[in-house]
Image: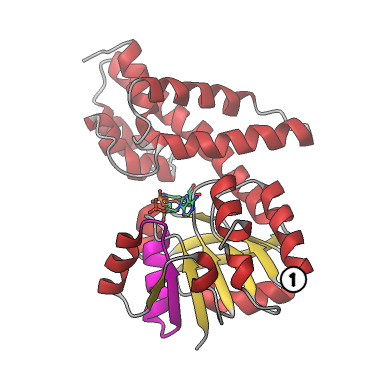
Amino acid sequence: MATVAFLGLGIMGYPMAGYLAKAGHAVRVYNRTASRAQQWLGDYAGEAFDTPAEAVRGAEFVFACVGNDNDLRQVVAGEQGAFEGMESGALFVDHTTASADVARELAAIGADKGIGFLDAPISGGQAGAENGVLTVMVGGEETDFERARPLIDCYARAVNLLGPVGSGQLCKMVNQICIAGVVQGLAEGLHFARAAGLDAEQVVEVISKGAAQSWQMENRHKTMLAGEYEHGFAVDWMRKDLAIVLDEAQRNGALLPVTALVDQFYSEVQALGGGRWDTSSLLARLTNLRSFD
Ligand SMILES: NC(=O)c1ccc[n+]([C@@H]2O[C@H](COP(=O)([O-])OP(=O)(O)OC[C@H]3O[C@@H](n4cnc5c(N)ncnc54)[C@H](OP(=O)(O)O)[C@@H]3O)[C@@H](O)[C@H]2O)c1
């Protein structure tokens, strides 16, 4: 059993750190809002600390799942950040959805201190984290990957190494590109079904057995038709991810016309007050423009 630290006990990090504790590892946690770490200690065995630097002391593995690039920089390389307390030979595993650039930047700082770095963004949502069945997309050195894998397995059902540092984040970008187009297609389909006077529930029942089937269709159509969006993956987070995607595409030359358009649609959802709504709220935007009810 290893001594590990987990930084960031948000919607995703809280249950992930919990799975490490349940597996028997000695888990040292840090959360910016200390009350959340205290809550975690009520649910799981471990120790809480006031700064990342203290939490990581003596830890062989350090995991993080915070918000965006700047949050990550602060927690890792800022004052009282993880790199101040980590020892040479330790390994940092970042589960934040961030840019490939920040992964390379932090990996280089870590390398100077003898600290390994894996970028390991996740997919599977809150339910995936709570049920320990996340998909993890990893970038970094193969030896580091093999070392971290048994621990990541505690909360994942698929863990894959995609290439050097940054590759995990690039894979996650592909994931978000695919989701953006699919959700808009589903929103338009349901919107059209209503305009055509069809029973949208029945339509989904029929077409979900064929080529139109998707995770979004299966898991989101009911709440979309009910106009319920207070759950799932927030539009604000999706816009953060799509900004990273579009920035990367500027550099690698990929053409992402639909992704760019859907990003604009999400800005309209934000303007409707839906920043914290699930990404399936693209239908709310259409309904707002033209309702057939
Ligand atoms: N939610 C999902 O379905 C999902 C799915 C896949 C990937 N992700 C990605 O996973 C990451 C975390 O998502 P989440 O849903 O768990 O977010 P969340 O519930 O908002 O939690 C964010 C965590 O990061 C901490 N944090 C943020 N900025 C910080 C800073 N500057 N310094 C220290 N701590 C900081 C927060 O601390 P406080 O408690 O003090 O705010 C909190 O513990 C994001 O990159 C997100 O895009 C989320």
Front-most of residues 9 and 234: 9
Q: Is residue 102 left or right of residue 48?
A: right
Crowding at dot 1, Cα within 10 Å, few <14 / some 14-19 / many 20+, comes out as some
Residue 232 x/y as whole percent: 35, 44
Tell me what residue is drawn at x 42 percent, y 34 percent.
235
Q: Is residue 117 left or right of residue 98?
A: right
Tell me what residue is drawn at x 31 percent, y 30 percent.
203
Q: Does the magenta run of residues contain 20?
A: yes
Residue 149 x/y as whole percent: 59, 75
Q: Does the magenta run of residues contain 136?
A: no
Tell me what residue is drawn at x 49 percent, y 72 percent.
55
The residue pinned by badge 1 equals: 113
Mark 1: which secondary structure?
loop
Q: How is the image coloured?
A: secondary structure
Residue 231: quadrant of the picture: top left
Q: Is residue 248 left or right of residue 43?
A: right
Front-most of residues 188 and 104: 104
Amino acid under disc 1: Lys
Residue 129: quadrant of the picture: bottom left
Residue 107: quadrant of the picture: bottom right
Residue 35 x/y as whole percent: 30, 61
Residue 217 x/y as whole percent: 38, 39
